[in-house]
Image: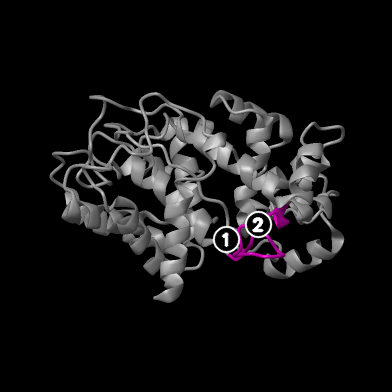
Amino acid sequence: MGCMRVVLVAVLCAFGLHAGFSVTNAQLSPTFYRTTCPNLFNIVFQVIFQASNNDPRIGASLVRLHFHDCFVQGCDASVLLNNTATIESEQDALPNNNSIRGLDVVNNIKTALENSCPGTVSCADILAIAAQIGSVLGGGPGWQVLLGRRDSLTANRSLANQNLPAPFFNLTQLKASFAVQGLNTTDLVALSGGHTFGRAHCSTFNNRLYNFNNTGNPDPTLNTTYLATLRLICPQNATGNNLTNLDLTTPDQFDNKYYSNLQQLNGLLQSDQELFSTPGADTIPIVNSFSSNQNTFFANFVASMIKMGNIGVLTGTAGEIRTQCNFVNGNSLGLASVASKDPKENMVSQS
């Protein structure tokens, strides 16, 4: 309990820090729930901390879940919606299918909040807070989470397939994917640093090990020692379901080792290594800067997470406050359908 209290203090203090890096949104505020749900952050922290006792990857998974939400029609919790007669779930989009994790934790957070302050806190805001707590639990930075988002009434699977960057993207494709969201090159490099913790399935990088770009050879930007290690984990023509660490140096720690790995050609995903190995790229000096100074990385990660959290938010009377994160209000399938989604939580691709 002593450790939990120390971490909780760090999480709560974080909301008063990094104000200089905030990207403001006039309709969002860090004090949005101050009177309507005063124990919000403590409740969210308690659920995530308990989950982390059995799942050290949950912090990385929650950061990624927020990212995958915001890149598809904005930060509106559309990624949480299950399939219904009228909704095609984003969870079944190629980048998400059998991949995204933490849905059960989000449901547990929502249940706890409904018991404490019913009909008040949106699922979109839960995702934003959970990402911040996930970072802090990994030893990373905290920040003031701007709040006041509302939840979407729809999901968009086709847009998820279109907007979410793939692990095999080159730098040009990555920049284009981020530009669509109003994010720049520094945001790209900073947010990619979220791969400093978590895991990835072999299927997300197998192409680098044996037949890169149909050459019949491995990716030349992959360190040969690391290549040999990865081939043992991911044999050729295997299923691709094996997992390995995104960061081979400090796999469960949120730090700047991700960038020093890139400098040594030890980036796991092609989309990671592209940031350093693309000749003449303007991302290289940013990687070097973040590698040499962790505080610089943390400050930029904070700024980019706040900026990303402002994408396409619903506020005011738009959307709704869902009582159950997996379904829009009034859906009668509710709990039975949520239970049917549980097996997906055990089929993990990344983070």
Relative to the observer, which residue lies in front, 2 or 77? 2
* Above or below 52: residue 82: above
Please identify the quarter of the rendering in which residue 347 is found: bottom left
The label shown at residue 116 is none
Left or right of residue 137: residue 38: left
One can see residue 347 in this view:
no
Dot 2 or dot 1, earlier in sequence: 1
Left or right of residue 294: residue 346: left
One can see residue 302 in this view:
yes
> Is residue 243 rendered magenta in the image?
yes
The colour style of the image is one colour
Percent of width and height locating residue 148? 32, 34
Q: What range is drawn magenta here?
A: 242-258
Identify the element where label 1 is drawn: loop
Relative to the observer, which residue lies in front, 103 or 310? 310
Identify the element where label 2 is drawn: loop
Please identify the quarter of the rendering in which residue 199 is found: bottom right
Q: Which residue is mark 1?
A: 139
- For image coordinates 42% across by 70% down, the residue present is 4
Mark 2 → mark 1, Cα distance in angstroms: 7 Å
Relative to the observer, which residue lies in front, 72 or 295? 295
Left or right of residue 235: residue 199: left
Q: Which residue is mark 2?
A: 255
**Neighbours of disc 2 within 10 Å: few (<14), some (14-19), many (20+):** many
Give the residue type at disc 1.
Answer: Gly
Give the residue type at disc 2.
Answer: Asp
Q: Do the numbered discs 2 and 1 sit on residues whose CB atoms are within 8 Å?
A: yes
Q: Quadrant of the C terminus?
A: bottom right
Percent of width and height locating residue 173? 67, 31
> Is residue 124 rendered magenta in the image?
no
